[in-house]
Image (spheres, grey):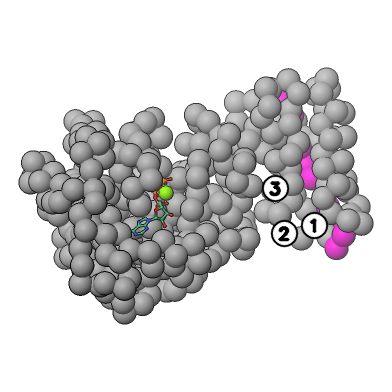
Amino acid sequence: MKPNEITKILYEVQHPAKGDKNIVELGMVEKIDIDGNRVTVTLAFPKHRDPLAEYLIGSTKAALVRNIPGVEAEVKTVVKDAGKKPVGLNLGTEEISGVKHIIGVASGKGGVGKSTVAVNLAVALARLGYKVGLADADVYGPSVPKMTGTEGQMPEAFRDGEKEVIMPLEKYGVKWMSIGYFAKPEQALIWRGPMACNALKQMILQVRWGELDFLLIDMPPGTGDIHISLVHDIPLTGAVIVSTPQAVALADVEKGVNMFRNESINKPILGLIENMAWFTPEELPENRYYIFGKDGGARMAEKYGIPLLGQIPLVQGIRESGDEGEPVALSSRPDGEAFVLLADKLARSVSF
Ligand SMILES: Nc1ncnc2c1ncn2[C@@H]1O[C@H](COP(=O)(O)OP(=O)(O)OP(=O)(O)O)[C@@H](O)[C@H]1O
Ligand SMILES: [Mg+2]
């Protein structure tokens, strides 16, 4: 048993007086000690004789017993100032100080292949010899664990002085981090407002990335509060925008572009990536069918004065390799090489 596995179990313990929020998201879990089959959880309460203390002690114990066969569960309590920040959320930028370039991978619209592009771009940059990490900031629908075949793995977490840090997973020469490693899928979907923002920042600022040339951030779709908060707190070098050539998707690109160019954000857009630019059947690799329209991405790039970094075709193999957790950028197939070209162009667009 590891502390973060216990944390996962404690998500089940809801505070009856605070909507359906659980004790982890309320910052009440002060400490987790594990000694053989004995697990001691210390809960922090804002005042002495909290009327709900007994109830929460009971439900915490019950959750442990229910989930860990043969556990000897103990729950202790401490009193802590309500004004004090919960442990671990006191986030500075030390963990990203060794990262040369942080690049947001964004799209105005969902489902355009942003995660596919982010994962393959990360793998392709690593193939070119760069040190790369990818943070899956899509707290509502994390897809990096599945796309990289790292589902079900649990990153190590440990305490370093006053801080709780998380080690990224490493596979295909890339360091990966995703909220999907910690939350059950249905949990990720219900996070809202500040909790979602915090979780997302933790996935970037609490991770021991080490020295990296590139840290890519797979941003959630859209242009909401989460994005604004993220770009304010994380020192991005710039963003790349993913779109399909369709006119509707292009209208959303405009929103994405405007968000980064907004006065208070003002981050450079390094380029546009046109995904699903054409369809190529596996058996007719020379044929291109422009099913979502032709050159929409190029027109958009021109309109906004941003470079078109690359065009990725719609091919069955890209979807299949994503589903199998083996990104196509690992292969020397034409669609894999398309990502390597794209990675090279992106790397050349920033300075070292
Ligand atoms: N070029 C492509 N060729 C074939 N399939 C693709 C391509 N790009 C993406 N897909 C498939 O389309 C689906 C959506 O892609 P993906 O999850 O990357 O999109 P997204 O923009 O990250 O979505 P969301 O908004 O949900 O985060 C996936 O099944 C993926 O495998
Ligand atoms: Mg995605």
Q: Nearer the viewer, residue 70 or 212?
A: 70
- Note whether 330 is above or below 288 in the view shown: below
Q: x, y (%) of residue 123?
A: 37, 69
Residues shaded magenta: 36-46
State whether residue 29 appears in this view. no
Report the residue marked by disc 2. Answer: 2
- Note whether 283 is above or below 154 in the view shown: below
Label 1–label 3 contact, CB within 8 A: no
* Marks 1 and 2, how far apart at CA: 8 Å
Q: x, y (%) of residue 324?
A: 50, 67
Q: Secondary structure at mark 1?
A: strand
Report the residue marked by disc 3. Answer: 7
Q: Residues within 10 Å of mark 3 (few under 14, many from 20)?
A: some
Report the residue marked by disc 1. Answer: 34
* Marks 3 and 2, how far apart at CA: 9 Å
Q: Nearer the viewer, mark 1 or mark 2?
A: 2
